Every structure is written in C-alpha cells, then in structure tokens.
C-alpha cells in the first residue's frame, strides 16, 4: 500500500518555535547584544551548527555568569554582506581563507569584529584563538525583546539547562536547547507552548554554509558528510514530516530538542510529546545497515544500537530508540530518506539519508511520502523529491 502526501504550498507548515539559550563568556559582548538586540555566532563548527539549528520565529535567551537573561524572539537570521565569500572592499580586515585569518592582525581594531551590529555603531570583541587566529561573528540574528528578567541556573525551573551545559561541552558550546514551555516558566510571561510559526522547508542556509565550509575547512561542500550537519538535516525533515517515524494526535504538542543530557549519556536528538520524552535519536556519520530489506546492522550500526540502548528518559518513561546514518546504496537517486523498522532489542528504527542527494531537493515544490512493507512486515517509508 502506498500513501502520498503532496505539498504544493512551497512546503509551508505551522511549526512550533524552539527555545535556545545562547552562551556568552564576555560581559562586554553581552551588553552589546542586549543594547543592539542582536545575537551572533563565530566562524567555527559550533557557530555554523547554531546558524542551522536556530531559525526565524524561535526564541532565545542569553546565558552569562550563572544567569539566564531576557527572552527574545528571532525576527531575522543573516550573514552580513561583508562576510560573503569572495566579497571585495566591504571590509579589508575580513579574510577569505582560514590560512590568512591565522596571521596575527596588529593594531587596536584587531580586537573587534569589523562589522557593526546592525544600526548600532557597536562592534563585538573578537575571540583570539590559537596561533593568533582571530575569530569573528558572521552568523547573526536580529531580536525582538519579549520579556526582561534574569534566572539563576540553580533554579529548579531550568534544571534541564544545568544538566545539559556541562556534559555537552560546557561554555565551549554555542547554545543549548530547552523545551519551549520552559521559557514561560522562567520569565512568567505568556509564551504558549502551543504557539506556531509559519515556516518553509528551505535549504538556503545549508547552501550558504556549504560554500563557507569549503573555503574555511577545505572539505567537500556535501554537508551531509559532516555529522553535525546531518543531525540538523534530520531534525529539520522530522519537524516537517514527523509522520515518517511517529504518530501524534496533535502536532502542536510535538517538539525536537538538539543534544540533550539524559540518564545514561547524551542524546543527539530527543523527541518530546505532551512534555514527555518519547524518542531518542542517535546520529552517526556512517552507514549503519548491511542490507536495508533484511535490516541487518553492520559494526557501526551495532555500536550505535548499544549506545542508544543505554539512554533512559529523565521522566522514567519508555521511549522509542532510533539510530540515524547515511547510505549511497539507494535503488533510485531521487529517494532522499528512508526509515526501517527493526525487530531489534536495542533499537526500533534506523533512519538513512542519501549522502549523494542534493540538499536543494528537499525544498522542491512536491514532496511525496511512500509507505510499503518488506520481509517480516517491517515498515519502510520513503521521502521522494521530484
């Protein structure tokens, strides 16, 4: 049996906003963020991840010195023209290659990011890395203040933030995600956990970062070959098509959280429904199946299953265990993603993405979901792009 889902409205849906804590370690930069209502992320892997993970319509707060500060809504995300790859004359301090940026920049202005914060004349302090590397902030978000206030992270309301801050990299992380309902509890304001934002399934930001990735890291522009890009891509697809893997009575109750600490470890993606953890997804930058039809796992797949089997929900509920990888063994190159239900003790689903498929295909006007069966009545689901 096949079921088709066709979306002709430019792939627009009513998506639930996400809530993120943006981590700052510099008080001067924090003051400038608050004054100019702008958030920014550095030209690093963590900064790129943040730019893809956080979207227009989401909510953010700042974190500094043990406190969560203010609540903002993101009204725009952008990379300034001065930071465009190949830009000439916009700002001579902006370097186009990683090697050039490693040269020590002398002079008073070298301590600042050269591009002002929107309409403000303020400039962020640059980060001075190893080997005189000057790290600046090209990934930017314009903000709208929703509520003012502070909350110390020892408060029970933000317990999940404290649990996630240290295990997943501490202050080296760019951001930490919390359930949207936590924003209302922190700031005692009417940020409904059911509010939705009109969004389109777009790959524009993926394409912009693929060019930068190729210049700064000298790697393939196929971002699916990088684990943290693969993670964001899986998250974005499931936000638009949760029915690929799960059944929810009310999609407004459904949200996906990136990189969460749980009992037994840290999970790449956590799916929550009705404020409860319902699924854990472990993302691996490998092929996980020997044979898709029979569901046989290879060594990477078995290791991923063992890892995800150790995780337990903070709420003590049973959850669906999923592992995600990639493959170049699709029968048809137009197939972008497929899900295999496994009869395995430690894993319920395997999600595979075709690493050779162009990311642009996910933003085509028609997306078709096909459902079928293979041996043992296991469920196979395909997302095809035409």
Image (cartoon, helix red, strand yellow):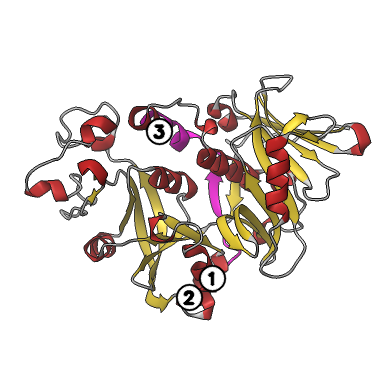
- The disc label shown at residue 208, or none: 3
Are the two marked residues, 2 and 3, in contact with CB atoms closer than 8 angstroms? no
CA separation, marks 1 and 2? Answer: 6 Å
Q: Residue 43: which quarter of the image?
A: top left
Q: Position of residue 221 (x, y in %)?
A: 45, 26
Give the side of residue 255 with respect to residue 375, left or right: left
Which quadrant of the rendered structure holds the N terminus? top right
Q: Residue at x 47, y 64 (%)?
A: 165
Q: Is residue 191 visible?
A: no
Q: Position of residue 85 (x, y in %)?
A: 30, 29
Q: Residue at x 57, y 35 (%)?
A: 10
Q: Residue 100: which quarter of the image?
A: top left
Q: Is residue 286 visible?
A: yes
Q: Residue at x 54, y 49 (%)?
A: 198
- The disc label shown at residue 186, or none: 2
Q: Secondary structure at mark 1?
A: helix
CA separation, marks 2 and 3? Answer: 34 Å
Q: Residue at x 66, y 68 (%)?
A: 314
Which residue is the extreme one toward the right?
376
Provide the residue designation for mark 1: 182
Q: Position of residue 113 (x, y in %)?
A: 20, 47
Give the residues drawn in magenta, as a range.
193-212
Which quadrant of the rendered structure holds the C terminus? top right
Q: Nearer the viewer, residue 105 or 69?
A: 105
Q: Secondary structure at mark 3?
A: helix
Give the side of residue 185 with respect to residue 249, left or right: left
């Amino acid at each position: 049996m096949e079921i088709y889902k066709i979306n002709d409205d430019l792939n627009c849906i009513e998506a639930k906003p996400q809530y993120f804590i943006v981590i700052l370690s510099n008080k001067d930069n924090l003051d400038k963020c608050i004054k100019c209502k702008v958030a920014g992320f550095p030209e690093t892997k963590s900064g790129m991840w943040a730019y893809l993970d956080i979207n227009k319509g989401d909510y953010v707060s700042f974190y500094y010195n043990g406190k969560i500060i203010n609540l903002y809504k993101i009204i725009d995300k952008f990379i300034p023209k001065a930071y465009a790859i190949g830009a000439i004359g916009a700002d001579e301090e902006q370097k186009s290659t990683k090697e050039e940026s490693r040269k020590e920049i002398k002079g008073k202005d070298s301590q600042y990011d050269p591009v002002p914060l929107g309409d403000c004349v303020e400039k962020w302090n640059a980060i001075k890395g190893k080997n005189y590397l000057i790290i600046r902030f090209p990934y930017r978000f314009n903000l709208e203040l929703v509520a003012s206030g502070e909350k110390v992270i020892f408060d029970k309301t933000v317990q999940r933030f404290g649990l996630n801050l240290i295990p997943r990299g501490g202050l080296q992380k760019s951001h930490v995600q919390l359930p949207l309902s936590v924003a209302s509890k922190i700031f005692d304001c009417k940020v409904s956990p059911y509010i939705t934002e009109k969004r389109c399934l777009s790959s524009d930001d993926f394409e912009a970062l693929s060019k930068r990735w190729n210049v700064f890291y000298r790697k393939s522009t196929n971002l699916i070959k990088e684990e943290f890009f693969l993670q964001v891509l899986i998250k974005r697809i499931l936000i638009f098509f949760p029915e690929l893997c799960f059944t929810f009575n009310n999609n407004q109750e459904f949200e996906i959280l990136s990189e969460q600490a749980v009992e037994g470890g840290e999970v790449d993606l956590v799916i929550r429904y009705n404020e409860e953890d319902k699924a854990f997804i472990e993302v691996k930058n490998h092929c996980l199946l020997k044979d898709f039809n029979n569901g046989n796992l290879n060594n990477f797949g078995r290791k991923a299953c063992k890892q995800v089997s150790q995780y337990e929900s903070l709420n003590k509920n049973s959850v669906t265990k999923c592992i995600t990888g990639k493959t170049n063994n699709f029968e048809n190159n137009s197939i972008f993603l497929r899900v295999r239900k496994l009869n395995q003790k430690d894993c319920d689903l395997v999600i595979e993405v075709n690493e050779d498929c162009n990311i642009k295909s996910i933003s085509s006007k028609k997306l078709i979901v096909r459902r079928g069966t293979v041996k043992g009545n296991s469920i196979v689901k395909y997302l095809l792009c035409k």
